[in-house]
Structures are given as structure tokens and as C-alpha cells.
Image (cartoon, rainbow, N blue to C red):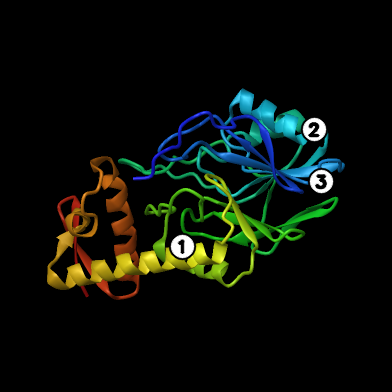
């Protein structure tokens, strides 16, 4: 289990992570968010304009910290990678304060019953413009291009800073943990395809919404793909031995797992099983409220 590092954390401070990028940590640490959500302000410090990526929770102190990092520049766009509640709720109040448009991912509101291992969706998100794959925003000395990366959520985008080779990866690739994929909106097949898409790119560094900068991005992505394939092979082997519900995979696949992480593990296994069924490698039968899976 990944542990949250001891405080103090640089909450509310504008840290320069590269010449065109400042990072502001929101005060929302949790098992879902690590030390909190990282908002990025993109643009030359002495320039006339900038963009804000993943404004985070609608917290007044965090909004003040973002505006301090903006330092009087015109905000050309408030850009959201996806609409979990730790990423996009500050978009509306920040837009109200500054007049900046909300640009980025598509709106998505999904109610899911039962336990989660990530944040719920933000019902307040209302973009002025939705970016498609390859579309972008441009300011003075900076260009941000949307890279569609569904999987963690169906509306997830990354943003490439063309001038520096940096990629803002939201929750698709994080600097502290692997991303969770939770059905019905989370899609393992789409997530794997999005990882392959990033692997084919040549980004210099990833700035994620949680955790430190990722300075060897392709190496990390290659490892993430290998880890998921290993899990898939485990599931196929266990299916060949006997039919079982998603919970029946956990003792064999996650030995010594912290009990608090069992629901997340079951959701991850379920995402793999749904993907295997789509590919004709598994099927399931409903036994009451429980799905029992077997090899196709």
C-alpha cells in the first residue's frame, strides 16, 4: 500500500516545475488523491496570458492560490482533464471570478452505487468548449494540444505542451500510483489502448495531477502495460481452473492485500473481466446479484 508522505506539503504555493509551468497543490489529501490535486498554470511568468489545468476542488484558499500564481495574467482557458470531484469543481467559480472560458473534456455525470476507489463525478462541470483529440489552445509562447486518453474515465484528456515536450496526464498516468479503472464508465480496453497511444509518443516529462513529475515516461508506461498484461494472464489462468465471481480472484491474485483495498481490487478485476468478455475470452452468468465468470 502506498503511504502518504509526512507533512508539511507545499499546499497553496506556486512552485515552478519548468520555465512555462507553475504547480499549485490543493488542500485535499486523501487515499484517492495522495497529497492533493495539483493544479498547473501554463504560460511565461512575465507574459500576458496563461492557461489553468485541473483547477481542482472548489476551495476558496485554493482559488486564491491559483490567482496568486496567475499573477494578473489573462487566463485564456480553464482546462480540465476529466470531471472527478478533485479535478473540475473549481472551474466554475474560477471562471466567474476571471471571465475565463472552461475548455477541455466533455461533461460526464454518472451515479455509481456501492464503494469507490476514486472520487465521484462533478455535477457542476459545464464547459464552454469541448476539445477533440488533436485540438488545442494557444497563448503567448505556449500551445496545449488535447490527447484523448479514455479508460480511467471515458472523457479523459491529456494536454501536451508543445514548446517543452511536457504532457499533463491528469489521472491517466500518475506520479504516485497506478490509475484505477472502474466500470461501467472506466474501460480497461480503452485504458490499455490509451497507454499504447502514449507509449508511441516521445514526451519528455509527465506532470500528473498527483505525485512528482515523471522523468522517464515511456519506461513507466511500458511497465504499466506489462503489469496489466500480467494481471490479465493471472485471470485467464484462474478462469481455466474454475468459474468464480470477481471476489473469488482476490485471494490468489493479491496475497496479503490490505483489507481496505479489497473493493478496489475487485473493481480492477471486474474491469479486466469485462474486457476479456468483449474479446471473446470470458463469459459470465448472473447468479442472483452476483456475476460468476468462466472461460469462454
Whether 240 is drawn above or below 30: the answer is below
Q: Residues within 10 Å of mark 3 (few under 14, many from 20)?
A: some
Disc 3 + disc 1, Cβ < 8 Å:
no
Pinpoint residue 18: horizontal percent, then vertical percent: 72, 49
Sooner in the amino-acid sequence: mark 3 or mark 1: 3
Instruction: Write down the residue under mark 2.
Output: 71
Q: Residues within 10 Å of mark 1 (few under 14, many from 20)?
A: many
Q: Residue at x 46, y 62 (%)?
A: 191
Q: Residues within 10 Å of mark 2 (few under 14, many from 20)?
A: some
Instruction: Write down the residue under mark 1.
Output: 191
Q: Report if residue 116 is visible in the image.
A: yes
Label 1 SS: helix
Q: Nearer the viewer, residue 256 or 126?
A: 256
Label 2 SS: loop
Q: Nearer the viewer, residue 225 or 212?
A: 212
Instruction: Write down the residue under mark 3.
Output: 44
Q: Residue at x 44, y 53 (%)?
A: 179
Pinpoint residue 60: horizontal percent, then vertical percent: 62, 23
Locate the N terminus by quadrant. top left
Sooner in the amino-acid sequence: mark 2 or mark 3: 3
Disc 2 + disc 3, Cβ < 8 Å:
no
- Marks 2 and 3, how far apart in space? 11 Å
- Marks 1 and 2, how far apart in space? 37 Å
Pinpoint residue 59: horizontal percent, then vertical percent: 59, 26
| Horizontal side, residue 211 vs residue 134: left or right | left
Q: Nearer the viewer, mark 3 or mark 1?
A: 3
Amino acid at each position: 500500500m502506498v503511504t502518504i508522505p509526512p507533512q508539511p506539503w507545499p499546499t497553496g504555493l506556486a512552485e515552478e516545475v519548468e520555465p512555462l509551468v507553475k504547480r499549485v497543490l490543493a488542500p485535499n489529501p486523501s487515499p484517492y488523491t495522495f497529497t492533493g490535486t495539483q493544479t498547473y498554470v501554463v504560460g511565461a511568468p512575465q507574459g500576458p496570458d496563461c492557461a489553468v489545468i485541473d483547477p481542482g476542488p472548489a476551495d476558496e484558499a485554493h482559488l486564491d492560490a491559483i490567482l496568486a500564481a496567475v499573477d494578473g495574467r489573462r487566463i485564456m482557458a480553464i482546462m480540465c482533464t476529466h470531471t472527478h470531484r478533485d479535478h473540475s469543481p473549481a472551474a466554475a467559480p474560477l471562471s466567474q471570478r476571471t471571465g475565463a472560458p472552461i475548455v477541455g473534456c466533455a461533461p460526464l455525470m454518472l451515479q455509481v452505487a456501492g464503494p469507490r476507489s476514486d472520487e465521484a463525478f462533478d455535477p457542476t462541470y459545464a464547459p464552454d468548449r469541448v476539445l477533440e483529440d488533436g485540438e488545442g489552445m494557444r497563448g503567448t509562447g505556449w500551445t496545449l494540444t488535447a490527447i484523448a486518453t479514455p479508460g480511467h474515465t471515458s472523457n479523459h484528456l491529456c494536454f501536451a505542451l508543445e514548446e517543452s515536450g511536457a504532457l499533463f496526464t491528469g489521472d491517466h498516468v500518475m506520479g504516485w500510483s497506478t490509475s484505477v479503472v472502474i466500470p461501467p464508465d472506466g474501460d480497461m480496453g480503452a485504458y490499455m489502448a490509451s497507454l499504447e497511444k502514449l507509449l508511441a509518443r516521445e514526451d519528455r516529462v509527465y506532470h500528473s495531477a498527483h505525485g512528482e513529475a515523471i522523468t522517464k515516461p515511456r519506461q513507466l508506461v511500458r511497465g504499466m502495460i506489462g503489469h496489466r498484461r500480467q494481471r490479465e494472464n493471472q485471470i485467464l489462468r484462474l478462469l481455466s481452473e474454475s468459474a468464480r465471481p470477481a471476489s473469488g480472484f482476490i485471494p490468489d491474485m493479491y496475497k496479503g492485500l490490505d483489507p481496505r483495498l479489497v473493493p478496489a481490487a475487485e473493481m480492477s478485476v471486474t474491469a479486466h473481466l469485462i474486457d476479456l468478455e468483449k474479446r471473446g475470452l470470458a463469459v459470465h452468468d448472473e447468479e442472483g446479484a452476483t456475476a460468476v465468470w468462466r472461460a469462454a
